[in-house]
Amino acid sequence: MARKDSEHQKKSMSALFRGKAIFKPLNTGWIDDHVACVREWIANIFFYTKNGKTIMIDAGYNYERLREKMGWLNIDPAAIQDILITHQDTDHVGALETDSELLFKDATVYIGEIENRYLTGETRRKVFHGFYRLPMVKMNNKKTLLKDGQIIYIGDIKIECILVPGHTWGHMVYLIDDTYLFTGDTIWFGADGGYSFISTLAEDNRLAVQSLAKLEENIRGRNHRIAVITGHTGWTDDLDFIFAHREEICKPFTNHYTDPEAPYDGYEEDDDTEANARGGLLAKKKAEKS
């Protein structure tokens, strides 16, 4: 995929989902002292900092304002040497594409060994129930391939890799320092809790639901606070909210799944400002009051 594909997705997805109250990304800012977020239209890039080392989780769209918004957080793109990728969709790898600004051309990319098959062309990414194949992503970064259950360290940052196939065949989520779970497109938060991610964008919705059930069992078994941070709908540490509807799939063209707090068009980002980014912490997602 190239910059034109990011622009095409912005236009097509904006038109398709406008008024559906589906996407409610976080704005640019900090969740706490360790986790920062950059908003790119409907998608979020995350940064995790510990003892002076910052790693990046997902690489967003091929987006012209990334350097600017990282500046709001006082994060230098040149300092990013390690990038975890949950999956290879346009809105999660764009800043690594060969026609991007190449802000991270010297960074090592960490991606699941199954997901990497999309990048090699062994597998083609399909959406809308298999009727549409996405263009291939092209990148030149050094890659480290990851296995399910593998634990790696980047500096003294502990990263546990958990395979959650369904949205894509090799989708990974990352549990960092046993405390922060970055879920990419595994979970979608509605007003009344979490669901399996949007049905029209999955390779296999049944498998996605099964993966989410396994993830719930894994996370609940930890017996300590874990912040669950999604790619498109915010964050929370309320496990009951997170897994409230994990056997259901978000079906974006039915009113049941709408979030009244979501913008009419998630691709309009006028409320994402430097003043807001520097003005306080990003609130966690809570259940809508009845």
Image (cartoon, rainbow, N blue to C red):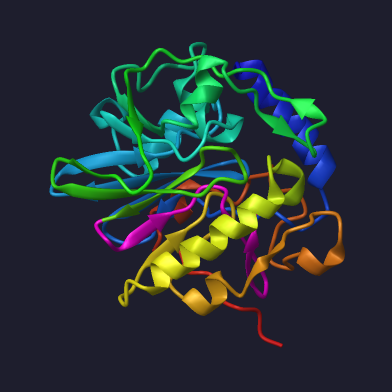
Give x and y (percent) for residue 122. Answer: 57, 18
Residue occupying the point 13% across, 47% down: 156
For the C terminus, the quadrant is bottom right
Residue 253: horizontal and vertical position, in percent? Answer: 86, 54
User: Residue 101: x, y in percent?
Assistant: 45, 16
Q: Quadrant of residue 75?
A: top left
Q: Nearer the viewer, residue 8 or 239?
A: 239
In the image, what residue occupies the spot 36% across and 73% down? 221
Vertical comparison of 168 with 219: above or below:
above
Image quadrant assignment for residue 282: bottom left
Give the image location of residue 2, x and y in percent.
Answer: 60, 16
Q: Quadrant of the N terminus?
A: top right
Is residue 290 shown left or right of residue 276?
right
Asked if residue 235 can be seen in this view, the reply is no
Q: Which residues are magenta?
A: 177-197
Give the image quarter of residue 268. Answer: top right
Query: Is 99 part of what is drawn in magenta?
Result: no
Seen at 71% across and 42% down, the residue is 201
Residue 270 shows up from this direction: yes
